[in-house]
Amino acid sequence: MSDYLLEKLKDPEIQQSLDTILDNLPKLAEMTEMLTQTYDLCQNLTKDRVFVEDTIGGMKEFIQPLHQKAKEVASTVIEANDHAKSSTKTYGLLAVIKLLNDPQIQNILRFSEAYLKIAEEKKQHSHQ
């Protein structure tokens, strides 16, 4: 053995670490076996075309409705923006008061109030 290695082995901290490793060797061997089995399983699954295709198909089934909904929302936003830009309509106080009775406007106001309240509460909690 080299002198460096012998010096390292004399270090009490190294000896304690080696004792810990030796005491836990059965657990380490078991963990190594489990990791090897998990690795082998993953390797086999990635080579299984049916499994891979089924997994991809499942992901597509989950993602596609979300993607479609996102496209619908984006389309509505673009269309509403175009209408708003091309409109020259002026809203007076009475028109605004009348709009306040619209159920969708009420939903937006309730959502906005709840959002602002929760955002403020989270802001206060994060500063504590």
Image (cartoon, helix red, strand yellow):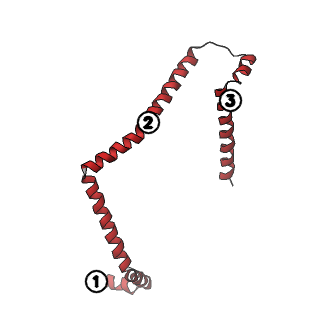
Ranked by sequence position, the earlier of labels 1 and 3 is: 1
Which label is found at residue 106? 3
Q: Quadrant of the C terminus?
A: bottom right
Residue at horizontal 35 percent and vertical 74 percent from the top: 30
Return the x and y of residue 68 as percentages of the image width and height: 44, 32
Amino acid found under the numbered disc labelled 3: Gln
Q: Secondary structure at mark 1?
A: loop
Position of 110 relative to 16 (above/below): above
Alpha carbon separation for disc pair 2 and 3 = 28 Å
- Name the amino acid type tagged 2: Pro
Looking at marks 2 and 3 on the same chain, the residue that comes earlier in the sequence is marked by 2
Residue 103, given in percent of the width and then of the height, sits at 66, 27
Coordinates of residue 13 in the picture (x, y in percent): 44, 82
Element carrying mark 2: helix
**Label 1, label 2: how far apart the Cα atoms are:** 66 Å
The residue that disc 2 covers is: 65
Residue at the image position 39 percent from the left and 40 percent from the top: 61
Q: Amino acid at mark 1?
A: Ser
Residue wearing tag 1: 2
